[in-house]
Image (tube, coloured by chain):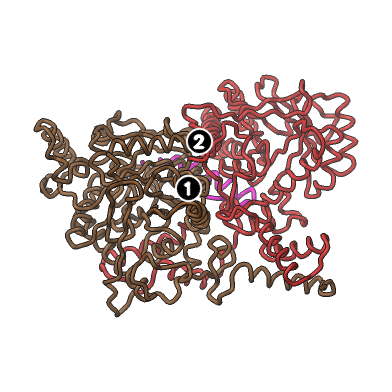
Amino acid sequence: MRLNEKAVIRKSILDLCNTGLPRQESTDDVIRKIREKNGSQKEENLWEYIVALGAQLSRPPFDPYREKIKLTTKIGRKGDQKISLKIPILIYGEFDLSQSSKDALNLTLNDLDDDRSTVGLISKDEPCDERKYPHFQILDDINKLADPDGIVLKYTGAKTEEKIEKIRKEFDGPILVEVDEDFSQYVESLLELGIDGILVNTENITKSKRYNGKHAIAVIHDARLAINEFYRGKENDGACLVVAGDVNNAGKMIKAAGLGADIIGYDTSLLIAKVGHHSENFFDEEITAQKIFNHMIATKSELTGIPAALGYSDFHNMSPGDFRTSSIKASVQGDIPLEGVDKTYRNIVEEILDEYVNTKNISVNQQERQKIINLVIEEEN
Amino acid sequence: MPLPKDIMNFRWDMANVVKNEGHVADLKSLLLDAQKASDGLVPYASLGAHSQNDYFSNIMINNAKINSMQDYSDVDASLIIGGRYSKKIIKTDVPFSVAGMSYGSVKLPAKISMHLALNKLAKNGIKILMNTGEGGALPWEVYGAKESREHLSKTHWDSILEFTDKLLRANHLEGIDIDELFTREYPLIVQYASGRFWKDPAYLLNADGIEIKIGQGAKIGHGGILPGSKVTELVAENRGILAHKPAHSPSRHLDILGPEDLVAKVLELRELTKWETPIIVKVGASRIYDDLEIILKSYADCATVDGLVGGTGAAPYEVREDIGINTIASLRPIRDAINDYYETHDKDGFKLLVNGGIWDSERIAKTIALGADGVGIGTGFLLAMGCTLIQECHTDICPAGITGSYEKLDVEKSAEGIFNYIKATKIELQNIAGSLGREKIEDIEMTDLSVNDLLTSIISELPFSDGTNHVSKIQTKIDHAINALNLQGGKI
């Protein structure tokens, strides 16, 4: 039930219970009237319209309490330079942390590694000497290269390619490039240069003109498509897609993974670190570290529980085929099948168009066909 | 258990930081984060998912009235389950049942309220089916029929009475008449779930029907859990498990991993019950065409399908919200699976029950028109007992005293609420069918329904009220696109 419709449902049922007599209006009559009065609800958070298909008889589920569900992922295209994460998370975000918050975070990340729950960190800071976790340094100036395990470069046009070539001469570890909204035009050439993956920040990209009005799922879908396009006809050597931004809970992380993300750029750990400092109470590094640790361990359990319920023993085995949507907009933006019909809205329009042009004897070429389909689906997007 | 103040404060601190950074704070999500940061555990939730689009209210029953001056009390509202393979059948007077809510997930007074209300309804000519849920049955449910007690030894019967006395005393319900309590006049379906929470074979042998629970809408593929705080000494004794420890049911039956295992399990229960008792298989709505195809071939009499909004006493929050499809969306693949099966088989009385987000007559009628034979209702019965929908059934703070807390539930008032709810819902259903000119509820058809939006038409295959459907709507859009692109010249 929708949260804002609870009162209607309760009142409607209580009318029956109190009188034992038929009502004047059904629950749906009342809900419909309210919706008509308030106008149709805007589908803003498309994550809420996407669901996964659970395993039952046609495929048995795994048991996350008794069986091992694999979350491990590797970053790096060359065999000897791969970085391994036990949870597919790189902590990354735009929260500005104080030194004490950073210390708490460092403490947690080391504890997580001890717990066999290694996650990585993406940060502008120089890596700590006593770290046990992989640190990806955001490198604005290649002369400031410290001793990171990996590097993140922000895409700044053609100069980025020069930078990559220079860095490659002195750095063997994984290089990720944080791309902008025009990524589909240059991802292939970046991958040709040997970068190990791209990072898309959905929050920044959906604010751009190209993605105006679109949701994070559209960005993830297009980014995965761009990587797949690069590998068309080639052997996949594991360039990864890191998705950051609007993926800050386990449900969204699972759906992002299903749509093609390999690793999540996760900022909630940074938020907890910052709030620890924000509190009116005296900042306690250990308590803050414990909170970040607890949060990550609970998230890890969620990330194993859902793939297990879908019938997978490996987080990375989820695919778009495991998801359905109850929104035409989500179907169009993420190329996700509609629930119950198992076809995307685009597929449905294509089928009806083909039937229509045949019946009406209209001749349309491939280009015109695509234009018609795009016009029709854009109307619902 | 109520959330500690420091969790709430931490949530607000996080919300302030998020706002200061210029973002919109999602308070529900931040509360879950604060819980996780506090205890390192997966947050739990209860009742049904907050589906943003359950389609029900986008569907109308054309020209039907739930309230009518005309008397439609002769409209047949009955439902029969069984007879496809079982020798016995279950016949009820309404096409809806009390969905599985076990002792433990709801407290004893709520279970007794439902028991008394259903007995009173039976005496008033309305037999309604009750499902025990997966946590086993209470003594008066197992031994409510007189003949079920005839073979019991005195020692056994005394031990049952002793446990009953303990249950009633612990809930300050000593005043209840034992003879009245040990009378069950309504049919009972017991669940055979992966946790196997029963200790007396009579649980299966004395039931009117057995439901093999593979999954449920709120936690498909996850199994079940009753939090340790709700596993009291008495709940533990009734289930045959340890007290104060969470009661986990595995995500799958250890002996049902696929279609062949399901057939073996159904046949095992058939042998146990001498082919007399109707057997049902319950799944959550997910890969529903495939799952139903398997159930149809499994020697079961009936399937129960539970949609995304189907409730639970406890489930991991993200599992409840993110796995499974909506009830209405599941009905099209279900119809396809049934139609495809009966293209090569003779009709044999297979029945379909559907649960999830159904709580009043109109929703029952819509679900039946779309292919169900009957429906299960859970949340509606909780509302009838005073549920406030705060969705904290997995904790001990239920303000109505239904699922867990020190609040006392008024058994008599709750039973009265349930009695009225069922009675009035039956009348409304008869009014709907009668005003459509139908003699039976089961005669309500898809042609009686229409929709008011494109997606619901696609999902349900229903037309709009003006007779158009999603195909013609999309064709009109194609026409406009062809005009806009000036492609008429391409006409051959």
Reply above or below: A216 against B79. Answer: above
Q: For residue B212, which quarter of the picture? A: top left
B7 is within the stretch colored magenta: yes
Shown colour of chain B = brown
Tint of chain A: red
The chain ID associated with circle 1 is B
- Rendered-image quadrant of the C terminus of chain B: bottom right
Local packing at callout 1 (Cα closer than 10 Å; few below 14, some 14-19, many 20+) is: many
Callout 2: SS: loop
Q: Is residue A346 left or right of residue A154?
A: left
Q: Is residue B246 left or right of residue A245?
A: left
Residue B27 in percent (x, y) is at 52, 50
Bounds of the magenta segment: B1-29
Does mark 2 fall on the same chain as mark 1?
no
User: Is B373 situated above or below B58?
Assistant: above
Q: Main secondary structure of the magenta part?
A: helix
Query: Mark 1 highlights which residue?
Result: B292
Residue B81 coordinates in the image, percent (x, y): 33, 53
Mark 2, Cα crowd under 10 Å, few <14 / some 14-19 / many 20+, is many
- State the residue in front, B25 or A366: A366
The amino acid type, in three-letter code, at marker 1 is: Leu
Q: In the rendered structure, find residue A61 and report the number of the disc placed on it.
A: 2
Name the residue nearer the viewer: B95 or A278.
B95
Coordinates of residue B363 in the picture (x, y in percent): 41, 63
Residue at left 54%, top 36%? Answer: A311
Quarter of the figure with the N terminus of chain B: top left
